[in-house]
Image (spheres, helix red, strand yellow):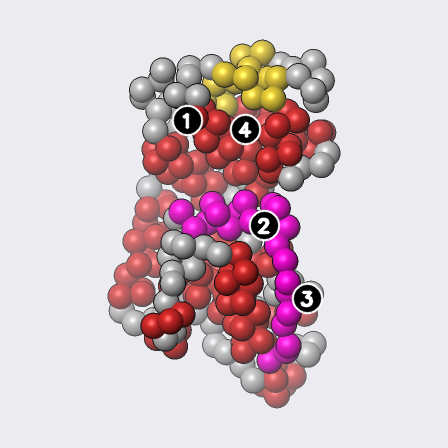
Amino acid sequence: MNEQLNTFELSRKWFNYGFDNPEKIKPLHTAIYFFAIEHCNRLGWKQKFGFPSQMVMEALGIKNWRTYSKGLNDLVEFGFIEMIEVSKNQYSSNIIAIVKNTKAPTKALDKALQSHSTKHSQGTVSITKQYNKEQENNITEEINFDKFLDWFNERRTKYIDKPSNIKRLTHEEKTTLNLLKTSYNNEDFEFAMYNLCNDKWANENSQVLCSYFLQIKTFNKFLSTEKVTMLSKDQRRRQGWKV
């Protein structure tokens, strides 16, 4: 048993790395890495363990073995997973190890989160005041995918003034949502959603969608920016928006 590993420390280092290297990280990497952590945990934090490709792909909803293989190899290149023995094909197991001593994390994410928290405490975000007590089941604590979709559709309808009736999440979107909920609270979701719905590029390219919102890079982008001004349809037209 590898007693030196723990999920909190591994998670913290991963998100620090992602914050510093947003051009490298995709939701695929996060899903594979956290599934590896979960699998290692269930095995009693073994020093090295089998990581069957077919099992991982099925659990994460990955259809293409090349896509999965590249994601796993990227994690090895990033220094978060050590490849002990390479599988011969998609039906056999890689033998891997979770790397504890990855590159020392920077303070960039800590500073960004602290700054964002300070902005909240100063009253720059007040959207959550519109929540009533019955709605106050924290989206990011007791997540229910149907309730999340209800929340997303309600906010999308309100902020972009168009009917919204998204009815399902993909397996990858559910996986990323579960990862986001471990690090962000209800206020963070509200803030990021507000900025997404009022982003010119996202609106003009029809990207006010769960598939775009539930990308860690996208979520962090709209969470870390200043609160934008909500415009009416007429104001958007006058500013050259395609509405």
Residue 201 visible, this orientation: no
Give me the residue at 36% from left, 75% from top.
132
> From the viewer's perspective, is residue 114 above or below residue 167?
above
Give me the residue at 54% from left, 17% from top.
50
N-terminal of the pair, mark 1 or mark 4, is 1
N-terminal of the pair, mark 2 or mark 1, is 1
Furthest residue toward top: 85
Q: Please give the residue where the numbered disc 2 appears in the rendered image.
A: 173
N-terminal of the pair, mark 1 or mark 3, is 1
Nearest the eye: 11 or 154: 154
Residue 11 visible, this orientation: yes
Q: Residues within 10 Å of mark 1 (few under 14, many from 20)?
A: some
Q: Is residue 155 left or right of residue 135?
A: right
For the N terminus, the image quarter is top left
In three-dimensional space, the C-alpha distance between marks 4 and 2, rounded to whole angstroms, equals 20 Å
Q: Which mark is residue 152?
A: none
In three-dimensional space, the C-alpha distance between marks 2 and 3, rounded to whole angstroms, equals 17 Å
The boundaries of the magenta stretch are: 161-182
Q: Which mark is residue 75?
A: 4
Q: Quadrant of residue 168?
A: bottom right
Residue 219 screen position, x and y as percent: 50, 55
Q: Amino acid at mark 1?
A: Asn
The magenta stretch spans residue 103:
no
Which label sits in the foreground, 2 or 3? Answer: 2
Q: Is residue 217 left or right of residue 3?
A: right
In three-dimensional space, the C-alpha distance between marks 2 and 1, rounded to whole angstroms, equals 23 Å
Q: Which mark is residue 206?
A: 3
Q: How many marks?
A: 4
Residue 138 screen position, x and y as percent: 38, 60
Q: Please give the residue where the numbered disc 1 appears in the rendered image.
A: 41
For the C terminus, the image quarter is bottom right
In three-dimensional space, the C-alpha distance between marks 1 and 4, rounded to whole angstroms, equals 18 Å
